[in-house]
Amino acid sequence: MVSLIFIFVLANHIEWRDAFRVMEFGISPERLALFLLLTGAIAFVYALRWQLLLDFELGMMASFTASIIGLGGNMLLPARGGDLLRVYYSGQRAEIPYAGVFSRLVVEKFVDFLTIFLVGLLAAVLNRTLFSNGYILYFSAVGLAGALLVAIGLRFSSKQLSAVAGRVLRLLKLTSVAEKGVERVLLDLARGLSVSAVALPSLLTLLMWVLLYSWAYILVGRIVGISLSYDESLVVLFAGSLGLMIPAAPSGVGTYHASVVSAFILLGRSSSEGIVLATAIHFLFLVIYAVPALVIGCQWRLGRLVTE
């Protein structure tokens, strides 16, 4: 429903003829090879970060496979469903309780949230237009402060929150859910949100945003004939990532595109360029991650059927 609303708004506000006119394909073997290298490096960083968050209880190959399942699944399933598949796969491979793996997923999302606001601050500082109007600068600063306050609250109030949640669930006759699920997740979050636990994953994530994703966006722009400077790529990355945080059917269709278009408007550029770039990024990342995720998923399911 959310995706349909955003698609409807975009369809009525984009000059589609202009969008087709701005497209100028510049596909070459070199650019495709570089894009594969960048997206492979992104998946590797995701895998390394996931290992760190799970205290290296998951091997690198299994962590890389889990990351492909997560990245590809998120492109295909609504509401970031690939992340739940990654939790399930990781819990089985490492024999870690699912509540413990899920709590690390929550920590990972906090790291993403924190670092994308740092990217927003960096983009606002580097881009003169955005720095002068201050919108992204202030928004990123408030978002960063809010993320830190939420983390501090969870870190030091987990026992109280766990006790309250446990009472409520027991009143609802959900004792097993309280003891094996919610209470364990909240208590594990307190450990996972310590400065020592999130420092290195946050650094890796920030480097991934500013060194890999940003250049992947610039490269996709060149493939479809849209020129992006480095600071503009950070703005688009910041806006698009926030759009993906809105739960929407497969892969943020509509929400992501609207966010990228909004970034182009903020930059004083054509909305037609924004929709072309958003569609190209969405399609290329879908092909790169969703296809291997489907193959892995089929092999995984087939292997389970054979063992059963």
Image (cartoon, rainbow, N blue to C red):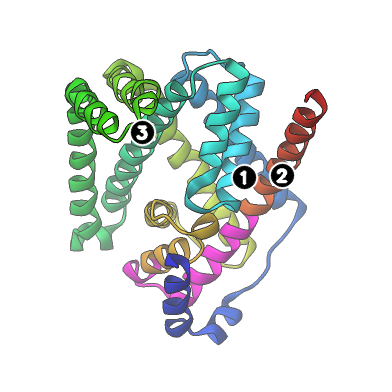
Judged by depth in the image, the label closer to the viewer, 3 or 2, is 2
Confirm or deny contact between disc 1 and disc 2 (CB under 8 A): yes
Which quadrant: the C terminus? top right
Q: Where is residue 268 in the image (x, y as percent from the top left)?
A: 34, 72
If the image is split into quadrants, where does the N terminus sit?
bottom left
- Residue type at numbered disc 2: Leu
- Residue occupied by mark 1: 72
Please, what is the three-letter code of the amino acid marked with disc 1?
A: Gly
Q: Is the magenta stretch mostly helix, strand or loop?
A: helix
Label 1 – label 2 distance at C-alpha = 8 Å
Residue at the image position 20 percent from the left and 28 percent from the top: 161
Contact (Cβ within 8 Å) of mark 1 with mark 3: no
Q: Is residue 181 part of the magenta span, yes or no?
A: no
Q: Name the residue under label 2.
A: 294
The image shows residue 208 at horizontal and vertical percentages of 47, 36
Q: How far is the residue under mark 1 from the one under mark 3?
A: 20 Å
| Highlighted range, magenta | 264-284
Residue 244 locus on image (x, y percent): 43, 53
- Residue beneath label 3, please? 111
